Amino acid sequence: MSELTELTMTEALAGLAKGSFSSRELTEAHIAVMEANRGLNAYVTETPEKALAMAAESDQRRKAGKAGLLEGIPLGIKDLFCTEGVLTTAGSHILDGFKPPYESTVTAKLWAAGAAMLGKLNMDEFAMGSSNTTSYHGNVKNPWTRRGDNRDLVPGGSSGGSASAVAARMAMAATGTDTGGSIRQPAAFCGIVGIKPTYGRCSRWGIVAFASSLDQAGPLARSVEDAALMLQAMAGHDPKDSTSVDLPVPDYRAGLRGGVKGLRIGIPKEYRMDGMAPEIEGLWSKGIGWLKAAGAEMVDISLPHTKYALPTYYIIAPAEASSNLARYDGVRFGLRVPGASLDEMYENTRAAGFGAEVKRRVLIGTYVLSAGYYDAYYLKAQRLRSLILKDFTDAFETVDAILTPATPTAAFAIGERMDDPIAMYLNDVFTVPVNLAGLPGISVPAGLTNEGLPLSLQLIGRAFDEATLFRAARTLEEAAAFTAKPAI
Amino acid sequence: MSLDRAAVRHIATLARIRVSDEEADALVGDLGKILAWVEQLGEVDTSGVQPMASVVARQLPRRADEVNDGANRDRLLGNAPEPAMGFFAVPKVVE
């Protein structure tokens, strides 16, 4: 049944509808690949019995003529989403043994649409990282390797397990979350599609919080159409998240093949960084050519505050994280390390429970919010954030979408760039501004490096205009005809 | 602004994270580097620019002040490292 794992979600839904195979068979095929590829360390928790039980129920529903949008599709879930009764660790030691007594809104919507859960996917601890090397559960490996070089590569992060699993056919698609690039960058490193929707599009209820004003859930999938379909099921207003927006979710697939004729696509000059790899520059030019050939008008634009996006982010995100992570204190759930006093118990628990990168960010966040430094750091960053949003608002007066590279490089080896936190932060140079402005961004695989590694382009859209992004992304997908697969 | 070991220790106390002397020394370097890097924001004149806390710029929605959840004490205590008699138990805080 291995050919079943080669199908896109859209193809699998057609096969299920025709009765060519059952959800049980589709799910069994994915469980087999999940077990065969354990070496990638993509899953923290496998739930094959649950998957098979959900698949059997799905087959019953389909027989009864009650098929949902994702009826019978086996999915992987990032370990940041609370899943009722199933271990949820956020990649951290401090959530040892935590089995949520409730289900996140997004996963509940996926199950209501008929999907089955294969398991929980590894990730950078509390979604802090760009290489999936900060997880308490160990590094995730990218299923891709450089040609003629068998060193293990990072899958990107923080949704590294999600990207690795979908690329390696261990799930038809997966959920991710994106605070500064955590869906788009790992999708790019693993040669798959990932979209961060507009802030407010998906409910954050039941997702372990990192930086609440930036976090947003989205899908990682193997085609633009699959990503559109899955976002359709995930999105929508939720009264339990006061920042989720009460707007109708359009039918993303309806206009998917509409093309880009007449669309105005912006090319921001500030994204042409000094020392940019020629391969990235070449890919970007190709993307411009493809969209032009399909009838789009390319417009040179300026986003003047781009270079300040990363430092702005590395004040705002840690500040919010230091506040959100205050709840991990050894009292109500997870790890507890005893101490002689309550304060000692807190300090011991948090010292043992958090990894190095999480500690760094909590401490930076504590510092920039502390008396005497709040105005100079936090308030300053919030003012910069206004300017970064204004750059985009001005640009969208004249363009319908913006085309950029997704990442400054292809996937790197595990161990490279680990000694300098700032060098690691630079991975997200093209993705972070989008989170600060709350806009939707999608990364689409578009080519290979000389060493045979995938590279992606990013499209950025107007707030709540995911439909145009999917349409343009589909045009890129068609033109790029990216069919390469990892060799595992 | 450069950090010294005492400043790192102070922040760590505020954040309730115990750090060893070696960790504190490493953090002096790491945090100092990150702070020096973010200080480039000082180049930008932001006078008159409003600080932005969220992209969802509108009034928070309200709902009726009615109980819509609760009565699930045992489920909530199910994850507690040390539940006792229907409570979360912690080391003694008052004499």
Image (cartoon, coloured by chain):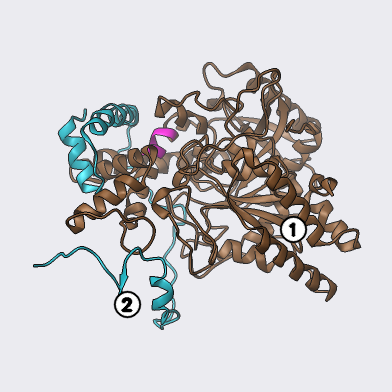
Residue at the spot of label 2: B86
Q: Position of residue B8 (x, y in %)?
A: 21, 36
Label 2 chain ID: B
Letter of the chain shown brown in the rendering: A
Disc 2 element: loop
Query: What residue would you read off at disc 1?
Result: A73
Distance of mark 2 from mark 1, alpha carbons? 41 Å
Query: Which mark identifies residue A146?
Result: none
- One can see residue A377 in this view: yes
Crowdedness of circle 1 by 10 Å Cα count: few (<14), some, many (20+)? many
- Magenta segment: A310-314
Instruction: Choose between A156 and A386: the one closer to the eye.
Output: A156
Decide if residue B51 is in sight here.
no
Q: Viewed as shown, does residue A25 lie left or right of B17?
A: right
Name the amino acid type tagged 2: Gly
Q: Residue at x 69, y 24 (%)?
A: A283
Placement of the C terminus of chain A among the 4 image quadrants: top right
Q: Nearer the viewer, mark 2 or mark 1?
A: 2
Residue A352 position in % (x across, y down): 33, 46
User: Which SS type dominates the magenta stretch?
Assistant: helix
> Which three-letter amino acid code belongs to the residue tagged 1?
Ile
Please tell me whether mark 1 sits on a helix, a strand or a loop.
loop
Q: Is residue A224 above or below residue A309?
A: below
Would you identify the image quadrant in which residue A183 lies?
A: top right
Q: Quadrant of residue A362?
A: top left
The image position of residue A272, as x and y in percent, is 56, 23
Figure colour of chain B: cyan
Q: Please state if A117 lies on the left or on the right of A390 as rendered.
A: right
**Camera-side residue of A367 and A94:** A94
Q: Chain of mark 1?
A: A
